[in-house]
Image (cartoon, rainbow, N blue to C red):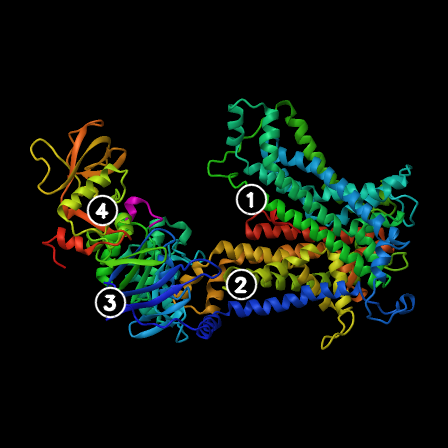
């Protein structure tokens, strides 16, 4: 029976603290969490703050112009970017261009992607399974693959170098078709349509036909059902896709760089790049801050929308049914449309690029015009690059750099991501988990090029015990790790939360200490998600351009910057060949990941 | 000598939340099969996890045998991996990447038991639980019941002195649950382990436990044998939580209620001392219907009602009576020769009544008056 009340004194505040410390020390979770928090504060928060403070301080070389000493507070850069006479060229026009390109890309990809998503998930179109994978491929390729393919086809005499195929065939494309807004918009729309196909398609697939049926039974027409039931429930996913595409367009650098430069079509990312490359650190910082701010606003809106989406949890209930609409006579044309989109977004660009690398003169389809020289030739009659690209040591150097830098960074961020997930899921210190979750998400708000600018600002000069890192591979690795943390930590948190703590607790009860639990239980169980957490950053790192273009120097060239350099020097065939290699790496990496993890990796490709 | 002793244990998850467990004193004797019983959210699982060391305390201390394993005041915390207990989770928490054999010998490998001895031990435990033919399979290839056995085997393999079970049967279907209940009882007899078993299922608690601790909203309500709990519930919560269909409660102070007036008059005329009584409870099986041969028993509480429902449960019947708008439930094992709509007379002997005071606590004075034969 119940014993007499033991006379146990209530613990004092000090005793409680001592006890909690004792408990915390038994569990390295909190210690790891604190170390990780410090690391990310240094890798993520400090660079961003440093960059933002650059926007408000007189930079070296500007003392005379501003008539203040280096490091003093100033409004000069902000004034210059937003209000001065050149603010139009620096900020406002690029802003308008960015917004209009994004708006165009969103509209186009909604139309195309939305239709495809519906065809794929709710109709009896032919070959739906094949198309479901094939139509995602454009997203696995670097966006500027399309840009290079476009120039190969439509380049005109506005810039030098080899002419485009159209030009060679005797038709001179106008500037508006060759460069600037139109091609940039179309390419981004093609590149980001998979977003819509994935997000909207998933929502459509999860949509319970019974909801539709109930409305029909109550006498609603097809149109009413579509407008009153389906659309309201689909809105969050559509909005979410829109916001994501917008955020991506905001940071997109490669496409507008290749296609915008010839006609001075600047977007915010290219404007920032030009300021950074001409050492306008202060102005660059203001621009980067502005891009960040727009990014933050966008993501905040997205978070709101996701909350709204979560209200509709009834979708995908147990009794959910997915009924396909018969297309009838339109079945063939619909399949044709999907096929056309595949050809336009994958076949055409890849085919064009490949053909261009085996042709001496663009657009001349004579047998003697074809050659493998640009791949494996020797003693070519050119100023530099006198061998085929595969025989050039520069390529292998860049490839090795790419693999090394991106590989190390991906493995590191994958492991860090799992650790972050572990701490977030386990630590009893709530604020620590919240901080880690938010700080690792922060780089997501910052477009790569702005993030690179932040790194440049912090590590370009020696600070305290840390030497100047500019020009080293270390700065690239660090920046890449930080840049990939949102995806790595999101994967880690999801995996650890899904795992729950019970398998680990069971091991603990059985007598396993922390280290043993990690080695024998946690890591083996999380093998799959760790692979994903490494592979996803690897793929996006391999095809990534914006970070490298700011931070890499010729000695630390990676494949992407190397191909961009070749573009700048008008070695079209070689540049296209390198881009094909990158696309191949990214595509087969994604494929390998799908095989290894037996999941549809495309769905996790949020980056 | 109690095996586990909790004193003044308190758990607060922080913020402004109420205590998940408040000021809990509990002794679990050596070799006891103790059930922590209560509705979900009552703090029973938290209590179990604190015993295991998976949750830390906000106040109080826990001893296992003579050893202090957890104390806020003394600043002692022995981590779970060193408490030498076994815990079976509700979800079983089998390690999906290890075979059944590796799941089972995990603890033994950690203890660096020699191979031959280890294999012998694993064989023995697997045979006891009838899972030896699955040793090379993975958990996902087993059914729920088999997984449950593996979860048990994994913990029994290291021969813990204390075995903690967190609703281990709730994910099984009814037939399997019955079988596993018998198995647990057998294991308890065979291994002589002290078992602490968390459940919200009163049937499970009644059939398995040697002692039941009923909890509600973080507070311990009553500790006792299953019979104690059922026959002498310490308060209205325990009375209402244990028993199915639930106990009939009649409020005494309700002037609008016909039943209340009836009960008031009954108590007033026969047990005038019980002025503090706030309500009485009558178990459904203590209610009888008067028939032609046997009328109302001498000195019983009785009244008129209409039959409003007859629910056969197979072998017994639940009869719903309505007396001026209030419902009474009655269970009987004899086929009731009545129909819905009949007017009947119900009665209950005074020794079958549970009297509670106005705060809902059992009035011991009433037991002395009404159950003179049962000494305690």
Decide: marks 4, 1 in contact (CB < 8 A)? Answer: no
Residue A309's place in the image compared with B238, above or below, is above
Task: Quadrant for the N terminus of chain B, please.
Answer: bottom left
Q: Mark 4 points at which residue?
A: B280
Same-subunit check for callouts 3 and 4? yes
Alpha carbon distance from label 2 to label 4: 53 Å
Q: How far apart are marks 3 and 1 (CA)?
A: 50 Å
- Same chain? Circles 4 and 1: no
Subunit of label 4: B
Q: Which of marks 2 and 4 is in front?
A: 4
Residue A591 appears in the figure: yes
Picture quadrant of residue B347: top left
Q: Are marks 3 and 1 on the same chain?
A: no
* Disc 3 and disc 4 in contact, CB within 8 angstroms: no
Q: What's drawn in magenta, residue-wise?
A: B170-177
For disc 2, the marked residue is: A423
Of B337 and A504, which appears nearest the observer?
B337
Q: Where is residue A453 in the image (x, y as percent from the top left)?
A: 77, 61
Which of the numbered marks, if any, corresponds to residue A251? Answer: none
Nearest the viewer among B292 and B41 is B292
Q: Does the magenta stretch include residue A284?
A: no
Let me know if residue A377 appears in the view: no
Residue beneath disc 1: A310
Are labels 2 and 3 on one chain?
A: no
Residue extending farthest to the left is: B293
Residue at (76, 65) in percent of width and height: A53
Query: Rounded to the nearest whole Å, what is the CA distance between mark 2 and mark 3?
Result: 38 Å
Label 1: which secondary element: helix
- Would you name the residue on which mark 3 appears? B30
Question: Which one is earlier in the sequence, the residue at label 2 or at label 1?
Answer: 1
Mark 4 and mark 1: span between their CA atoms?
A: 47 Å
Q: How far apart are marks 3 and 4 (CA)?
A: 37 Å
């Amino acid at each position: 029976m119940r014993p007499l009340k033991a006379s146990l004194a209530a613990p004092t505040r000090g005793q409680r603290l001592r006890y909690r410390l004792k408990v915390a020390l038994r569990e390295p979770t909190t210690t790891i969490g604190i170390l990780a928090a410090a690391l990310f504060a240094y890798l993520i928060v400090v660079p961003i703050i440093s960059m933002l403070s650059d926007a408000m301080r007189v930079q070296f070389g500007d003392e005379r112009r501003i008539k203040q000493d280096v490091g003093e507070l100033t409004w000069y850069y902000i004034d210059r970017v937003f209000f001065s006479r050149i603010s139009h060229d620096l900020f406002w026009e690029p802003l308008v261009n960015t917004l209009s390109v994004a708006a165009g890309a969103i509209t186009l990809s909604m139309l195309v992607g939305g239709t495809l998503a519906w065809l794929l998930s709710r109709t009896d179109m032919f070959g739906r399974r094949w198309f479901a994978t094939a139509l995602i491929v454009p997203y696995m390729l670097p966006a500027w693959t399309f840009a290079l393919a476009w120039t190969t086809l439509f380049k005109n005499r506005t810039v030098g170098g080899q002419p485009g195929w159209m030009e060679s065939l005797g038709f001179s494309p106008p500037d508006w078709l060759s460069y600037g807004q139109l091609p940039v918009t179309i390419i981004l729309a093609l590149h980001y349509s998979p977003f819509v196909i994935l997000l909207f398609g998933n929502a459509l697939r999860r949509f319970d036909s019974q909801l539709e049926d109930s409305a029909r039974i109550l006498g609603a027409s097809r149109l009413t059902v579509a407008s009153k039931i389906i659309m309201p429930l689909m809105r969050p996913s559509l909005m979410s896709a829109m916001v994501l595409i917008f955020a991506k367009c905001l940071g997109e650098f490669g496409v507008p760089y290749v296609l915008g430069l010839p006609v001075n079509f600047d977007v915010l990312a290219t404007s920032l790049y030009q300021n950074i490359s001409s050492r306008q650190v202060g102005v660059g910082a203001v621009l980067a801050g502005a891009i960040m701010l727009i990014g933050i606003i966008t993501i905040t809106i997205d978070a709101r929308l996701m909350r709204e989406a979560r209200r509709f949890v009834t979708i995908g209930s147990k009794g959910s049914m997915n009924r396909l609409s018969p297309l009838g006579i339109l079945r063939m044309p619909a399949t044709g449309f999907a096929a056309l989109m595949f050809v336009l977004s994958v076949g055409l660009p890849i085919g064009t690029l490949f053909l261009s690398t085996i042709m001496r003169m663009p657009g001349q389809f004579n047998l003697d015009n074809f050659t493998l020289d640009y791949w494996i030739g020797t003693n070519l009659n050119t100023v530099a690059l006198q061998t085929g690209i595969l025989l050039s040591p520069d390529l292998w150097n860049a490839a090795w750099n790419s693999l090394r830098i991106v590989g190390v960074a991906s493995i590191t961020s994958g492991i860090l991501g799992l650790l972050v997930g572990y701490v977030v899921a386990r630590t009893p210190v709530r604020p620590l988990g919240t901080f880690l979750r938010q700080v690792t998400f922060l780089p997501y708000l910052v477009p790569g090029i702005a993030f690179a600018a932040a790194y440049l600002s912090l590590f370009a000069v020696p600070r305290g015990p840390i030497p100047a890192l500019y020009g080293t591979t270390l700065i690239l690795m660090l920046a890449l790790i930080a840049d990939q943390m949102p995806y790595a930590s999101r994967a880690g948190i999801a995996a650890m939360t899904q795992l729950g703590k019970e398998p680990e607790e069971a091991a603990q009860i059985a007598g396993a200490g922390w280290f043993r639990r990690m080695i024998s239980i946690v890591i083996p169980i999380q093998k799959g998600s760790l692979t994903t957490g490494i592979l996803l950053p690897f793929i996006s790192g391999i095809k990534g351009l914006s970070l490298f273009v700011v931070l890499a120097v010729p000695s630390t060239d990676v494949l992407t910057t190397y191909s961009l350099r070749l573009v700048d020097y008008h070695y079209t065939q070689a540049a296209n060949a390198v881009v094909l290699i990158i696309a191949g790496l990214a595509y087969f990496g994604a494929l390998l990941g799908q095989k290894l993890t037996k999941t549809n990796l495309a769905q996790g490709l949020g980056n | 000598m109690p095996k586990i002793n909790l004193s003044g244990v308190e758990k607060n998850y922080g913020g402004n939340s109420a205590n998940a467990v408040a000021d809990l004193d509990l002794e679990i004797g050596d070799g006891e099969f103790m059930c922590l019983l209560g509705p979900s959210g009552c703090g029973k699982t938290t209590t179990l996890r604190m015993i295991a060391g998976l949750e830390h305390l906000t106040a109080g201390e826990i001893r296992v045998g003579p050893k202090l394993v957890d104390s806020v005041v003394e600043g002692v915390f022995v981590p779970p991996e060193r408490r030498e207990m076994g815990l079976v989770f509700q979800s079983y928490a089998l390690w999906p990447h290890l075979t059944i054999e590796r799941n089972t010998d995990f603890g033994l490998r950690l203890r660096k038991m020699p191979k031959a001895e280890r294999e012998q031990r694993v064989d023995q435990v697997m045979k006891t639980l009838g899972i030896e033919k699955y040793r090379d399979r993975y958990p996902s290839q087993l059914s729920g019941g088999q997984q449950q056995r593996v979860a048990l085997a994994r913990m029994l393999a290291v021969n813990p002195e204390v075995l903690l079970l967190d609703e281990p049967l709730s994910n099984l279907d009814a037939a399997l649950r019955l079988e596993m209940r018998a198995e647990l009882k057998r294991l308890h007899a065979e291994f002589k382990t002290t078992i602490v078993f968390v459940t919200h299922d009163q049937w499970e608690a009644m059939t398995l436990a040697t002692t039941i601790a009923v909890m509600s909203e973080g507070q311990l309500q009553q500790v006792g044998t299953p019979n104690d709990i059922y026959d002498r519930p310490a308060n209205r919560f325990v009375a209402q939580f244990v028993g199915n269909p639930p106990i009939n409660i009649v409020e005494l102070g309700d002037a609008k209620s016909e039943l209340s007036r009836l009960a008031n008059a009954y108590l007033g005329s026969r047990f005038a001392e019980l002025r503090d009584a706030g309500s009485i409870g009558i178990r459904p099986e203590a209610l009888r219907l008067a028939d032609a041969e046997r009328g109302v028993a001498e000195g019983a509480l009785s009244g008129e009602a209409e039959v409003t429902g007859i629910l056969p449960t197979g072998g017994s019947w639940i009869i719903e009576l309505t007396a001026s708008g209030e419902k009474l439930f009655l269970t009987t094992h004899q086929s009731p020769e009545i129909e819905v709509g009949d007017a009947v007379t119900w009665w209950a002997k005074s020794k079958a009544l549970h009297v509670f005071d106005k705060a809902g606590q059992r009035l011991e004075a009433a037991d002395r008056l009404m159950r003179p034969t049962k000494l305690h």
